[in-house]
Amino acid sequence: MPSLPPSVKQGSESAFARAEYDTRIARARANMQQAGIDVMVVTGPENIFYLTGQQTPGYYTFQALVLPVDGDPVFVIRQLEYFNFISNTFISDAAIYTDGDEPVGFLVDVIQKKGWAGKRIAIDKRGWFLPITVYEALQSRLGTIHDGAGLIEKLRAVKSAAEIGKLELAASYVYAGLRAGLAAVQVGASENDFVAAMMQAAIAAGSEYMGMETLVSCGPRSGIPHGTWRRRKIAQGEPAFLEMAAAHDRYHAALMRSAWIGQPPQIAIDMEKVCQDALQAALDAIKPGEPCEAPHLACQAVIDKAGYTDAFKKRTGYSVGISFAPDWGEGAILSLYTGVKTLLQPGMTFHIPPALRVYGEFTVGVSETVVVTETGCRALGKTPRAMQIL
């Protein structure tokens, strides 16, 4: 391994203390044992971060934590990432490959040298960055690769007090960003102006790079779901839609708000009120022991009663926490939606963004990032929920 310069110290930039990771790895090993897995190959950057603290924008190159039920884990990593890995983690055993190596073959060699080739090996199949070719190559060289999807993710669903502290900080950055973005909504200002204000304020407040771009649009463009800024200038009588996330140590909080320059049409006022009522109904339905579908059914009931069923064809919310691009949520872990029977527990965290739109004309919406408590839920933000009317 490369010799370390004095300024690079093991775990010096870690998001948590070593004891937090030791607890997480012990819980992961318990899940592995229960599933009959001897060795887990962890490739998803979120799962890697959860278990080790390793974070880098360079996860587009191959990296893997190889975690045995017994014995020390080993981290397979590109040479360029080694010093970053040392700073972020307390893992001492790194297998370093160069840009001239074939990473899958390198990983297989590591597994064989460790004597794990004949064991029951699993991989987290749900990761964004597990190409089919990599999975097939591992199978061809090691035999059956078992499905480890969910073994780590279900540990991430309930946050520790330390994790909630990170989310609270992220929520304060979002507050700064949304406040600045709403202040920038003025006649003649562009979508780029809104985003520049939002990003500058959130980053100045402390945010790191976000898992997904801000969703900002104005005028008729705001009536298109997931629209992003494209230089359009807002005029009198037009709406603006602003949604963003911010991050602290990769933990993300998100927030959505609406604005209108001049008097909105009555349908927009009505829809915005329904969004407010639907959000509150969802928050009121969040209680430990209730299924994840309960907040969605409460939200949907408000929307259905108002006659806007056709304008709301999505889940009410999704889990938030550790995220890397291309997403700011943990929606693959938990959704607040019909049929999701997983029981809500204290420490679960969600972004709840009810929005209604007339397609191609406008969108109105409001959201909160919340943590489930012993008696209900607590919103982490403090941004006023009402649509801003100028």
Image (cartoon, rainbow, N blue to C red):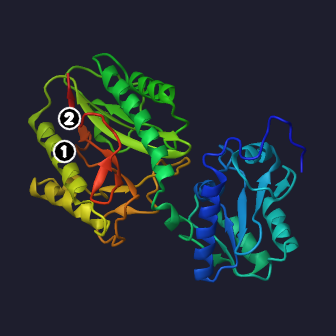
Q: Residue at x 26, y 42 (%)?
A: 366
Residue 190 in the figure: left or right of residue 359: right
Q: Residue furthest front?
A: 19
Q: Position of residue 155 (x, y in %)?
A: 52, 65
Query: Looking at the image, how many numbered discs can be counted on the residues?
Result: 2
Is mark 1 in CB contact (under 8 Å) with mark 2? yes
Instruction: Tell me the CA gap for discs 1 and 2.
Output: 8 Å
Left or right: 358 as drawn, with respect to 131 = left
Crowding around mark 2 (Cα neighbors within 10 Å: few <14, some 14 to 19, many 20+) is some
In the displayed structure, 19 sits above or below 109; it is above
Q: Which kind of residue does numbered mark 1 sit on? A: Gln
Three-letter amino acid code at disc 2?
Ala
Say which element carries label 2.
loop
Q: Position of residue 326 (x, y in %)?
A: 53, 48
Report the residue marked by disc 1: 276
Q: Within 10 angstroms of label 1, few (less than 14), some, or many (20 or more) residues?
A: many
Per the image, the residue denoted by label 2 is 386
